Image (cartoon, grey):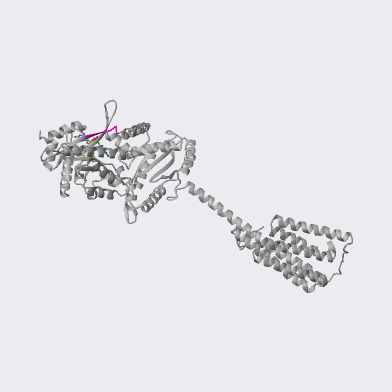
Amino acid sequence: MPLSDNVSLINTLDDLTYIRRRRVIQISAATGIGLLTSLFVARGFAFNIFLIGFISLAVSGSLAYRNHVTASSYVLLGSMSLMLFALAATGAGVFDIAMLGYPGVIIFAALLGGVMLFSGVLSLVVVQCIALTWLIMHDVISPNTPFLSWSHLVFIIVIFSVTGFSVYILVYDIRRLMNSLQRENEKVEQNRLQIQHLAHHDPLTNLPNRLLGERLFVKKLKESQEKKLQLALLFIDLDNFKPVNDALGHAAGDRFLQKISQTISGNLSDKESLIRFGGDEFIILASDVENRQQIDQLCKSIIEWCSSEFEILQTNIVVSGSIGIALAPSDGTQFKQLCRKADIAMYEAKHNGRNRFEYYDPKLDKDSDEKFKLIQKLRPAVLNEALSVHYQPLVDLSTGNICSVEALVRWPQCDGTMIMPDKFIPLAERSGLIVPLGQWVLEQACLFAARQYKKGNSSLTVAVNLSFAQFKDGTLPQIVKHALGKAQLPPKKLELELTESILADSAGNIEAQLKEIKGLGVQFAIDDFGTGYSNLNYLRTFEASKLKIDRNFITTLGSNKDEETLVSAIINMADSLGMTTVAEGIENEATLVKLVEMGCDIGQGYYWSKPLPEDKIELLLQENLNGI
Ligand code: C2E
Ligand code: MG
Ligand code: MG
């Protein structure tokens, strides 16, 4: 059946019930009109039958009007078939023209009601036909074949019109229903396609996601292998994306990711596909790779695209990208395996200074294996407090007295060796262990300083290093308060060493936390100054009272004139900001003399002492106190 577009749709079950009710009323009305017409031409008994039929139809119509659709259908069809039976019984029996009405009644029953109504009406009609035949054959009634008159023609036309009209409107409903079904089907198909798209694409950038990425990988690897060429999987991680999110908000961060992904994908050739792996991580699958130069060139271009300037919320943003590369089939043929290897290589690129690319090397896997094992060992060591805190003195260069000690953590091993913090602090930061570890060091340092304070070393302060990861959950002010309270140490005897990267990398409310800690009376020092951003704005935000010049500038001081100028400039700048300068890594007298000449206030280094365990530093402090 052709579906016409101008047929309105049936959308809900309520629509269907309403339509059925309307149709029963309409068929009752049409039959009623037919009967009225017949009343004008009917005589005698037929007139009475039409009259009774007309009244039954009025009852059926009013039932439908009151929403009793099933009851009204029974009344309508029951009265119609009885009327036809009466007409046939008083007329020519089974040859009477009233028989023409039966097919209409059966069709209405099929279309208006359920199986019950249909089988009921069909049975009634069959029974009536059998009854008519039996009554005539047993001479109970005698058929009365009338002479053809115009009134018969009127009856026939009325029967055809009522049946035709009713069938027409019911079939019209079926067409509407089919149209609705077709639209519904189209919607379902559209939804299916949309769900499929969502399942395979990242909603923010509309790039293929990991799932589709894996399929593309399988397809591209097959094509490359057929040509005996390599497939490169490039794992890209944006450097310094977090500060963008933190400073400008997540909406701006999202917009930035959209723009950067558009820039990269817009520049790629059809042999390369960009995939969003998650967060600020992307993957590029580059097929048909003939040599490494080809990949080197692609990586250089990607780094260039990543470092372009993007304008978001009237702010110009520049980030960079670190890329790790794994090749298929030489590094493996499984998507997940290559992602892991490229990820390891990407970390190596970050470790080597960011904004660069590195190829996967099995040696890196070994390193990461070792790191994993070390983290597994570190966890119980931290929980069982199996670490040790050493203290290195800081010397006031104007008096030569120890004014402070820096707490530096070590990890003693069973064989008597020590694992140094440079090796395990980054792992603790990555695994979250830095939070309990940092808290433990802080508590130990406060207890140590409190003991010294009670022994009369009232001018001594203790410095503790902090990591960015300790700011993450916002509980640092409580941890500091607790450590000071537990040791009963005056807050001004505690100094916290922060690196500039803390402000650049850390999420959340770092400034508020710093303010709260500052409010307690605790001092801040900027550690390793010169290696990070060397941003004067950060110095203001930290409200630090000390600036520790990084060891790398101090150890080469005698041999490098440029460095001398730089250190001198840092000391002058800190001085003008009212900050005390500390030189880390003084190993000899010549360096010390130079720094004193430059106006440096405090020194720290092997020249005086290496970091010492508690009993040894106590002796040193005692000698210092006694003026030895
Ligand atoms: P840092 O805070 O800059 O500590 C100074 C580092 O320089 C110490 O290394 C110290 O032993 C070393 N040093 C001091 N004077 C000299 C010198 O004259 N010559 C040489 N070659 N080195 C000198 P260490 O103890 O290995 O600590 C390394 C870094 O580990 C620290 O650098 C600090 O960033 C981190 N760290 C240590 N303990 C902790 C801790 O409890 N928590 C956190 N978050 N980091 C810590
Ligand atoms: Mg330090
Ligand atoms: Mg330092």
Q: Which residue is situated farthest in the right direction here?
A: 139
Q: Is residue 532 toward the left or the right of residue 109 in the image? A: left
Is residue 388 in the magenta section? yes
Q: Is residue 237 magenta?
A: no
Q: Residue at x 65, y 66 (%)?
A: 65
Residue 286 location, quadrant: top left
Relative placement, left or right, of 62 versus 359 is right
Q: Is residue 225 left or right of residue 182?
A: left
Of residues 211 and 163, which is closer to you in this image? Answer: 163
- Residue 49 relative to residue 543: left or right: right
- Picture coordinates of residue 122, whole percent (x, y): 76, 57
Q: Where's ligand 1: which quadrant?
A: top left
Toward the viewer: 282 or 447? 447
Magenta region, residue range: 385-390
Image quadrant occupied by the C terminus: top left
Image vertical order of residue 134 relative to residue 339, above or below: below
Q: Quadrant of the N terminus?
A: bottom right
Can residue 601 be seen at all in this image of the molecule? Answer: yes
Residue located at (77% from left, 62% from top)? 81
**Number of numbered tags placed on the structure image:** 0
Q: Position of residue 462 (x, y in %)?
A: 20, 40
Farthest residue, direction bottom: 40
